[in-house]
Image: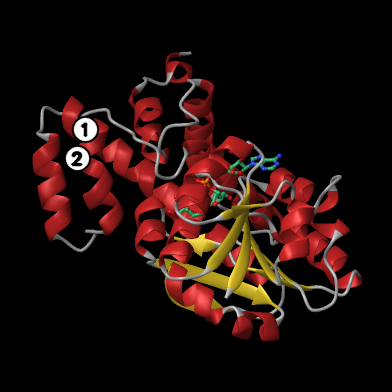
Amino acid sequence: MEVGFLGLGIMGKAMSLNLLRHGFKVTVWNRTLSRCDELVEHGASVGETPAAVIKKCKYTIAMLSDPSAALSVVFDKDGVLEEICSGKGYIDMSTVDADTSSKISEAITEKGGYFLEAPVSGSKKPAEDGQLVILAAGVKALYDEVIPAFDVLGKKSFFLGKVGNGAKMKLVVNMIMGSMMNAFSEGLVLAERSGLSQQTLLDIVDLGGIANPMFKQKGPAMIQSKFPPAFPLKHQQKDMRLALALGDENAVSMPVAAAANEAFKKARSLGLGDNDFSAVYEAVKIPDCSADA
Ligand SMILES: NC(=O)C1=CN([C@@H]2O[C@H](COP(=O)(O)OP(=O)(O)OC[C@H]3O[C@@H](n4cnc5c(N)ncnc54)[C@H](OP(=O)(O)O)[C@@H]3O)[C@@H](O)[C@H]2O)C=CC1
Ligand SMILES: O=CC(=O)O
């Protein structure tokens, strides 16, 4: 199977390498073109523009940072829309909001192409290991056709119906994850300030009902103030922002998520946006000056 791949960041690089390892022919494009070099060493071809990739491939996957990147790659000059046509499928796996996904879907459909949104749950390591959870929605026929690729990229795929449902599901999941990371960070700070061992806290948490892979994997690095980026904090804050907007639309009160978003914003203002999202711990550590006012 031949696929195009647009966006070779942390996730896109791991995912396209995985496809190459499993015998797919992959044509890649990245805004910073030099990032294609490593993929070429592993057998990929390069398209000079998103349009060139679409022209060459029947199926093209995108994995881009945020709504503005996802829209730009489709609508700007040399973008996807210039070459998408009947018989071609476009699969956007970026985490965006439902409106962005719908705009892309409508434009692709107008040109006769097929569209699937397919954001993923799982981070750098699951992407490397083909263990993502894929949350697809859109054209079911396209979903069925690209299952061989999803089987390589993920451990489980869900088809969630109409465009927007995949985006919304992903935002709900990441809203929970971001709130959990804040509670975990507060717990680590509280343990330390109370004179307790943070390592002992990690051991206890891992043995009980709130044990989970995220705390287990990230906790030991966090207590050493190490945050190598797997899921960049700036993207988690984008997801909190988009999830809160979804809450606004549906009149769902989300005070926990709103507080978590503030902590991620504070972390970004401290210059931590390119660190892993667990770096919110550094923001949580800083005393809240407003409490003294
Ligand atoms: N990392 C993770 O653990 C996970 C991330 N996600 C989601 O996947 C998506 C990608 O994440 P990740 O790989 O971590 O992000 P990165 O920041 O590592 O990569 C972002 C990619 O988007 C490209 N990009 C950014 N802006 C533009 C633009 N205006 N036009 C064209 N390309 C652009 C970047 O190109 P360039 O190299 O030129 O900057 C790069 O290829 C995000 O939506 C994220 O929320 C989902 C699950 C897990
Ligand atoms: O979106 C991030 C993830 O870990 O899932």
Confirm or deny contact between disc 2 and disc 1 (CB under 8 A): yes
Residue that carries the numbered disc 1 in the rendered image: 223
Quarter of the N terminus within the rendering? bottom right
Left or right, 198 with respect to 283, comes to left
> Quick check: 145 above or below 188?
below
Secondary structure at badge 2 equals: helix
Residue 66 higher or lower than 168, as above or below: above
Q: Can residue 270 be seen in the rendering of this structure? A: yes
Mark 1: secondary structure: loop
Q: Residue 117 at x, y = what percent?
A: 66, 67
Place of residue 14 in the rendered image (x, y in percent of width and height, measured from the top left): 44, 53
Closer to the camera, 124 or 224? 124
Left of 116 or right of it: where is 124?
left
- Ligand 2 is within 8 Å of the C-beta of the residue at disc 2: no
Residue 173 can be seen in this image: no
Q: Residue at 71% across / 50% down in the picture?
A: 70
- The residue positioned 31% from the left and 38% from the top of the image is 185
Query: Compared with residue 282, is residue 19 higher up or lower down, i.e. above or below?
Result: below
Residue shown at the point (42%, 21%) measured from the top left:
288
- Crowd tier of the residue under label 2, counting other residues whose Cα lies within 10 Å: few below 14, some 14–19, many 20 or above: some
> Three-letter amino acid code at disc 1?
Ile
Question: Which residue position holds label 2?
Answer: 220
Crowd around label 1: few <14 · some 14–19 · many ≥20 (10 Å): some
Q: Which mark is residue 265?
A: none
